[in-house]
Structure formats: structure tokens, C-alpha cells
Image (tube, rainbow, N blue to C red):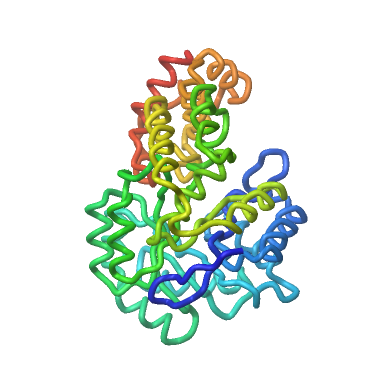
């Protein structure tokens, strides 16, 4: 495992972090974690040198933090830096921040959080947090020892990112960034700004929720294969990130033992300046080919769920993108009709707009649902 200095914190963190948002589940129920398997793979990652474990209040319907605690029992907590996130959407008054932090300490069975983030900040939640005494809360939780470093995860425009980053002396931040998202949300510009301020930067969605490396169209697979030396798309996508000096660590949502084995192997030879200029040009070509195919920039995070009218929003988008990316909308429609229950299909969307504030990608969900109905039928 390679380790990188994490901004002004001075901590040496593993290049690869373990994200507990996509743990293995039972029978496809995202709230029902397969605990034995989850504990096993988290410990497999730690045994392989991973020393940053990332979870949050809302992951897996609130079950991620307790399962993470079980995985970190028997001496594993002492081996890692633990990160979790304050559910900003639940903060209605100043005391709520202390309430949720204390509950998280209990759920995680620890006396401190190493890296504590305000979860999924956007313009609206940022204003709410400021109104509820955020700038009193942050220094206090560091002073009393409940938290070592404070930061935020982010989903909004670059302009909002700049406002947030300039408003406080943050230790770190977490942004969505990958080969497809250089100009999306905080993007490359935000990455460089954070690094210039001495902040550590955590990268989430390095494979864009798996969209970069699953169901690869033949012509894009050929483009991946033409990059020398020949490596997997996962390898190239992660290596592209680790090649950049501003990147601190990557959070990968690994849920199979072989995911960990593969990612550990790639991380072991990662480093700044490891890609050639020819590699970078060929990767730009791959990026452009994907951009030509994606219809909706959904990462399957499921923050929009549950829909009050039963629509399975991420699945609707998944099969729309799937059909587009493999240049076969009929195949996307076939899978949509097989795998999305009738009562969960896009035709049940009434455009109420409740999902809009929940979506970290700020997608026009109701309008895109209309597209799903247009392409796949009602």
C-alpha cells in the first residue's frame, strides 16, 4: 500500500480508502447488510494496508455505522482513521449537531471520530448549517476531543464550493471527481483550490458509481485496450486520479473480496507522475467517448429515495444510461421491464419535485423521468 500526506493534517493516509456506502446486502435490500461478509471485506482491506474507513449516518438506512463498528472491533479501530458524516438535512436547531454526533459516537462504539464531515453540502444546507451555529460547533468538537479533523462533502456548483471553502479554516473536504467529472461540481478547479489552501482532499465516486467500468461498449473497450501497457479500465481510472498531486485518497465502495484484491494491487503501484503524456491523451479520448453516450449524470447514490410515489429513481436512470452507453436502448428497455417492478417505474412519477432537493447531483429528475417513459414506455 502507498501512503500519501493528507494536506495540513500531516496524517499519512492510505491511497485507497474503504467506503461503507455500498456494503454487500441480502437479497438486494440495501437496508439489510450482509454483516459477516461486510465485516470480512472491511477487515480484508485493513489487513491489506487501508487505514481510512468512511461511513455516514444515512448509509444503508442507518445500518452502516453499527456494522462498521463491528468490523472495527478486536483491535481494528486502532489501525485506522475513522470518518463519518453529520446528517445536515436533520439539523433544525443548534443542539441537533451535538445530538447526532453523540449518537454516532455510540453507534460507532468509539470515543472520537478522526475525520468528521458535514454531509453533502449544497447551497441550501450550507445556509441552514450557518444559521444553526456551525461556526461555534466546529471548533468546540475539536477542542473537547470528540473530533480530530473537520471537513465537508460536497454536491453543488463550483461557485458554492468556493463560498464554503473560503468561509472556514477546514482541514479537508470530499468531492466527486473522476475522469468524466473534471468540470462537474467542484471539479478540477475545486480540487486545486482546496490543495492550494493546504486541505486534504478525499475523492468519492472515482469510478462514477461503477458506470466507468461496467457494461463497456465495444468501441470504448477497444479504446481502453489501446492504452499501453494494457491494464483494466478500473486500473486506468484509479491511476489517472492517483497521478495528480492534489489528490489525497480515493474512497472506493468495494463489496466483493476480489474488488479489494484488485484495488489494493492498483494502489500498490500508484503514484504522482506515473502516467505518460501518451497515456493521458488516450484517457481523454476514452472520456470523450463516454461523454457522448451518457444521458443522465446519476451515480446511483440513492439520496433521492424513497420516492413518495414509489418510483425507483436510480434504477430508472440506470437502465436509461445502460441502453445509451451500449448503444442499445431496446436492451435497456428489456432489463428495465424485467428488473424494475411495475409500481416502481417512471410512469408513476407525478413531478411533485420532492426529489430535487435530495439529489446531490442536482439532476432535473421529473423531466428525465419523462424521457424514461418516452424511451421505455408506460
Among the 4 quarters of the image, the one containing residue 216: top right
46 or 370: nearer the viewer: 46
Q: Is residue 261 visible?
A: yes
Q: What residue is shown at x 64% (from left), y 50% (from top)?
A: 23
Q: Quadrant of the N terminus?
A: bottom right
349 left or right of 2?
Answer: left
Q: Is residue 89 visible?
A: no
Residue 246 higher or lower than 352, as above or below: below
Q: Where residue 214 sits in the image (x, y, percent)? A: 57, 33
Q: Where residue 255 sits in the image (x, y, percent)? A: 66, 48
- Residue at the limit of the structure toward the bottom, as seen here: 144
Q: What residue is shown at x 33% (from left), y 49% (from top)?
A: 187
How many marks on residues?
Answer: 0
Residue 307 higher or lower than 328, as above or below: below
334 left or right of 9?
Answer: right
Q: Where residue 313 sits in the image (x, y, percent)? A: 48, 33
27 left or right of 1?
Answer: right
Residue 369 higher or lower than 105, as above or below: above
243 or 195: nearer the viewer: 243
Amino acid at each position: 500500500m502507498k501512503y500519501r500526506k493528507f494536506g495540513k493534517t500531516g496524517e499519512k493516509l492510505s491511497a485507497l480508502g474503504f467506503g461503507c456506502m455500498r456494503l454487500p446486502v441480502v437479497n438486494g435490500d440495501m437496508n439489510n447488510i450482509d454483516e459477516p461478509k461486510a465485516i470480512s471485506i472491511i477487515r480484508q482491506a485493513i489487513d491489506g494496508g487501508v487505514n481510512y474507513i468512511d461511513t455516514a449516518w444515512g448509509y444503508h438506512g442507518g445500518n452502516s455505522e453499527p456494522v462498521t463498528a463491528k468490523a472495527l472491533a478486536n483491535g481494528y479501530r486502532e489501525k485506522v482513521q475513522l470518518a463519518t458524516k453529520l446528517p445536515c438535512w436533520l439539523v433544525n436547531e443548534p443542539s441537533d449537531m451535538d445530538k447526532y454526533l453523540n449518537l454516532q459516537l455510540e453507534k460507532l462504539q468509539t470515543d472520537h471520530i478522526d475525520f468528521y464531515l458535514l454531509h453533502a453540502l449544497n447551497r441550501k444546507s450550507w445556509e441552514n448549517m450557518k444559521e444553526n451555529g456551525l461556526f461555534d460547533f466546529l471548533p468546540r468538537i475539536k477542542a473537547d476531543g470528540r473530533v480530530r479533523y473537520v471537513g465537508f462533502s460536497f454536491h453543488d456548483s463550483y461557485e458554492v464550493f468556493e463560498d464554503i471553502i473560503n468561509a472556514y479554516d477546514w482541514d479537508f473536504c470530499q468531492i466527486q471527481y473522476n475522469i468524466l467529472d473534471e468540470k462537474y461540481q467542484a471539479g478540477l478547479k475545486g480540487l486545486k483550490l482546496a490543495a492550494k489552501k493546504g486541505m486534504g482532499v478525499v475523492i468519492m465516486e472515482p469510478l462514477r458509481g461503477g458506470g466507468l467500468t461496467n457494461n463497456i461498449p465495444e468501441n470504448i473497450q477497444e479504446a481502453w485496450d489501446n492504452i499501453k501497457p494494457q491494464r483494466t479500465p478500473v486500473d486506468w481510472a484509479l491511476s489517472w486520479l492517483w497521478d495528480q498531486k492534489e489528490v489525497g485518497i480515493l474512497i472506493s465502495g468495494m463489496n466483493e473480496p476480489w474488488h479489494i484484491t484488485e484495488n489494493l494491487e492498483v494502489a500498490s503501484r500508484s503514484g504522482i507522475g506515473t502516467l505518460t503524456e501518451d497515456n493521458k491523451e488516450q484517457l481523454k479520448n476514452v472520456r470523450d467517448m463516454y461523454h457522448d453516450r451518457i444521458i443522465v449524470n446519476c451515480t446511483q447514490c440513492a439520496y433521492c429515495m424513497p420516492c413518495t410515489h414509489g418510483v425507483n429513481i436510480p434504477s430508472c436512470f440506470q437502465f436509461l444510461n445502460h441502453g445509451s452507453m451500449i448503444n442499445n436502448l431496446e436492451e435497456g428497455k428489456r432489463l428495465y421491464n424485467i428488473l424494475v417492478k411495475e409500481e416502481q417505474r417512471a410512469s408513476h412519477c407525478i413531478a411533485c419535485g420532492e426529489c430535487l432537493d435530495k439529489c446531490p447531483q442536482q439532476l432535473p429528475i421529473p423531466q428525465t423521468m419523462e424521457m424514461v417513459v418516452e424511451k421505455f414506455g408506460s
